[in-house]
Amino acid sequence: MKKSTLHILLGLLTAAYSLTSCEDAINIKTETGPTELVVDGWITNKPGPQTVRLTLSAAYFDNSPARPALGAEVTVIDDKGTVYAFTDANGKGIYTWAPKSDTVALGRVGGKYALQIRYDGEEYAATNEIKRVPKIDSLAYEEESFPINPPEGPKDGYLAQFYARDFVGLNDTYWIRPLKGGKPYGTDPGNISLVYDASFSPGSPSDGLVFIQPLRQSINVNQLFSAGDTVGVELHSITLESYYFLFQVRQETTNGGIFAVPPANIPTNISNKNANGKKALGFFGASAVSRAETVIDPKKARPKE
């Protein structure tokens, strides 16, 4: 027998033995890093209260609810020098600014905002601005049937879409937030729908055009609507930094299967004023909001093509 053939047979026998041998349990010990402040704040030009949620990071395998960060001082300062104080009235780490009237808004288009947080002897800061947002021209819906039952909703119903036109000028970015019954739905991070100049991403010749159809129909979130449902959309203007933050949130959330890549930390715009101080996680965003809603009326639905 040739020497090379013998090596191949020995290799096959070794592989077969390894497949039939006992498996030993391996307990992986992971290091628990330092607890860090996690910031979830997003202000808008919508009238009414605004909130900034503060929690504390936990170990990787800790599935318990996030612990609130209590006793912080939270303020937002705009480019005109107005200071907005946020307080945690219920002791749950949800810091709220409430206007004297529900018709008063904190944010305005073109405004720049600085978030400042004092917590556990550290001072954190972040900045963002509110960009322009196009008007939603209309909402439409048509009869539709799915070949199989969708994850939610009926098999036969109505497919909705909205119409909006991107501003002329490159690098306008938006976040589409679907509404059902007047409230956001389909809020899983994997469903985040982002727009870059009326298309999905940079490089498309879509500046100044009506949003492409897949984006217009993203308000359905893998379902059909029924007659009488209230369907709607909020279109949020966002900065490029916010666009890439949300893009990475969606990417990491859906990172799985045979094409998965090694997970990566999502960058934050929260910084510690002390370069040697504790780090923070999360994001501080700002948006102008365009909103539209309609009730599904079979008499007004477009027929199925």
Image (cartoon, rainbow, N blue to C red):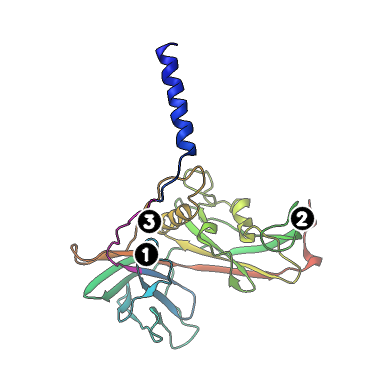
Characterize the local packing of mark 2: few (<14), some (14-19) or many (20 or more) Cα atoms within 10 angstroms. some
Q: Residue furthest bottom?
A: 100
Q: Give x and y (percent) for residue 259.
A: 49, 42
Residue type at mark 3 is Ile
The residue lying toward the viewer, choosing from 72 and 288, is 72
- Label located before the other in sequence (1 or 2): 2
Q: CA distance from mark 2 to mark 3?
A: 38 Å
- Label located before the other in sequence (2 or 3): 2
Tell me if residue 62 can be seen.
yes
Magenta extent: 26-38
Characterize the local packing of mark 3: few (<14), some (14-19) or many (20 or more) Cα atoms within 10 angstroms. some
Which residue is located at x 49 percent, y 32 percent?
16
Q: CA distance from mark 1 to mark 2?
A: 40 Å
The residue lying toward the viewer, choosing from 25 and 131, is 25
Q: Quick check: is 32 in the magenta stretch?
A: yes
Q: Is 279 on the left-hand or right-hand side of 16?
A: left
Tell me if residue 106 can be seen.
no
Residue annotated with mark 1: 282
Magenta: main secondary structure? loop
Tell me, yes or no, whether the two marked residues, 2 and 3, touch with CB atoms within 8 Å: no
Query: As displayed, is residue 201 above or below residue 18?
Result: below
Q: Is 23 on the left-hand or right-hand side of 114?
A: right
- Label located before the other in sequence (1 or 3): 3
Query: As displayed, is residue 122 above or below residue 153?
Result: below
Tell me, yes or no, whether the two marked residues, 1 and 3, touch with CB atoms within 8 Å: no
Q: Is 95 on the left-hand or right-hand side of 199?
A: left
Which residue is located at x 79 percent, y 54 percent?
304
Circle 1 SS class: strand
Residue type at mark 1 is Gly
Q: Which mark is residue 145?
A: 2
Q: Is 187 on the left-hand or right-hand side of 282?
A: right
